[in-house]
Amino acid sequence: MAYVVTEACIKCKYTDCVDICPVDCFREGPNFLVIDPDECIDCTLCVPECPAEAIFAEDDVPESQKAFIALNAELAKRWPAIVERKAPPSDADEWKGLSDKLRFLER
């Protein structure tokens, strides 16, 4: 069972989770992070590190966010690994906690 980054990360893209990951399973897109399900070792370390509360165990992904399981797998094949924390976008805090952000996902 892998962990999954959900909609709450879109346009927030805090990278606190990246620093704690022991296997470098995060992949970075323009305004979103995903977890490579083939690399994730289910350690749970990233979950409490996410300020946007966007990371869930695959079995615990809320029903409204289930599409993100496939989206993480798809984008992880295309996006490069991110292995160091970066500053979040300047407006990340404005987007934090908002819903219905899928339309803003940049691939």
Image (cartoon, helix red, strand yellow):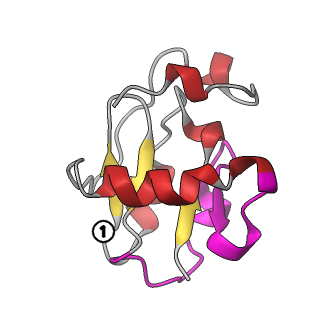
Q: In the figure, is residue 88 to the left or right of 23?
A: right
The one of 2 and 97 positioned closer to us in this rendering: 2
Which part of the image, by quadrant, shows the N terminus? bottom right
Q: Amino acid at mark 1?
A: Asp
Q: Residue at x 68, y 28 (%)?
A: 96
The one of 92 and 72 positioned closer to us in this rendering: 72
> Can you see residue 18?
no
Q: Main structural element of the magenta stretch: helix, strand or loop?
A: loop
Q: For mark 1, does the 10 Å Cα neighbourhood hold few (<14), some (14 to 19), or many (20 or more) residues?
A: some
In the image, is residue 46 part of the stretch drawn in magenta?
yes
> Can you see residue 44?
yes
Query: Disc 1 marks which residue?
Result: 24
In the image, is residue 75 part of the stretch drawn in magenta?
no
Q: In the figure, is residue 46 to the left or right of 57?
A: left
Q: Residue at x 41, y 29 (%)?
A: 31
Q: Which residues are magenta?
A: 38-63
Q: In the figure, is residue 62 to the left or right of 4?
A: right
